[in-house]
Image (tube, helix red, strand yellow):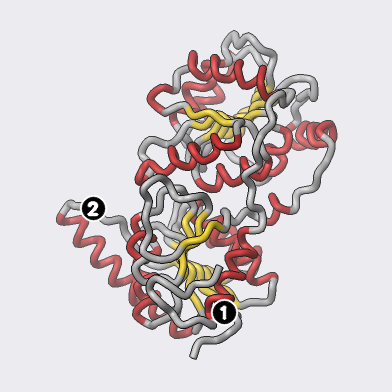
Amino acid sequence: MRKEKLTKLIITCGGTGGHFFPGFTIARTFKNNGGEILLITGGHKTNYKKLYSSKYNIEIKEISSARFYKSPVKILTFILMFIKGFIQSLFIYIKFKPDAVLAMGSYTSLPSGFAALFLRIPLFLHDGNSRIGKANRLFSKWAKLLMLSFPLAENEKMKCKSVITGMPLRPEIINSKNMEKSELINKFNSSFNTKFSIDKPIILIFGGSLGAKTINTVIPKAFVNFPRDVQIIHLTGKNDFSESKSLYKKATCENIVIERSDNMTLLYSVADIVISRSGGSTISELSFFNKPAILIPYPHAAENHQYYNALHYTKSRIAEIIENNKCTEEKISETLIKFIEKFYNRKIESINLSMPNAADKIIEIISKNLATKTQRHKGAEV
């Protein structure tokens, strides 16, 4: 008989920031509520286990996994890594004895998800995009419930019941204080040794943690002789920092180029307009801060999910999509001028799409469904 209260939870998520941070946010929330938590993830160039496990006293286990490719050699690698990750997951589950497993998508969740099913541990799913990833589509055949960050894209069908909970946002973002704009800019200037002014629009630009080539190399050129007096904050990621910084030397507006920042809350808060990719976490953060945004979806994202995420945010009435292959310095300049005229003084009323209590909602739904008998299509409570 299943426990009626959720006390021990395992979350399995991918190794990239877009998968890790939502899963880690739920883990932090669950731990703060008195639960026992363990996170299973894959490896990544950014060693999140080293950075965050001891800091928040949350156990993180890395398991083996590999993407599926059609190449015979890579298929063999996938099978071997899957078996290894499956066995690693079995040992973790048997030792930890979780009441439930929450899979956050990505190929990393395949071995751990199947291990949960093998041991008959209730499996729940969460997806951070409007187009559901292949792993979650597969697991929807057996999962108790799929929780969504955004409404499903057109023609998207799942084999289990689904409910929109929103994307779990880091507590630092949710708990950010509402300071006056002048105070925020003073804090920014103090932190980054800049002289930004409240009287001119601030444009925040970023791609991914490693970088976004189009954003980092095309957009700086738009600010050479830009016809408006603006201030630029550009996060480049690791790969393109030097090149972007060099390009901004020709810009005629005040700018600061940063490789990365641990205080995105401050950057979002001071920004008047954002130019970015459209991963699930980014869209959720834009929604929370209700920021006008020019979105450039990553063209190689699985199932083109970044485009559908961006399409969802256009419902806010303060966003526009520029496809990657149409992202020229002329198009950026033209669109940004229009945005400054429309949104700097908020002449158009927006629709806030934020769902800030997603982590609590997800934990509540999992707990509520532990008392119900696992069914393939029915019986999940939302």
Residue 367 position in % (x across, y down): 58, 76
- Residue 243, compared with residue 278, is above or below; it is above
Q: Amino acid at mark 2?
A: Tyr
Residue 10 position in % (x across, y down): 51, 73
Residue 2 position in % (x across, y down): 51, 87
Residue at 63% across / 9% down in the picture?
227
- Residue 200, compared with residue 53, is above or below; it is above
**Residue 69, disc:** 2
| Quarter that holds the C terminus | bottom right
Question: Neighbour class for label 2 at 10 Å: few (<14), some, many (≥20)?
Answer: few
Nearer to us: label 2 or label 1: 1
Residue pushed farthest left?
Answer: 72
Question: Neighbour class for label 1 at 10 Å: few (<14), some, many (≥20)?
Answer: some
Residue to which mark 1 is pinned: 8
**Towards the viewer: 154 or 238:** 154
Mark 1 or mark 2, which is nearer the start of the sequence? 1
Left or right of 343? Residue 146 is left
Looking at the rendered structure, the secondary structure element under dot 1 is: strand
Residue pushed farthest bottom?
Answer: 1
Residue at 55% across / 16% down in the picture?
333
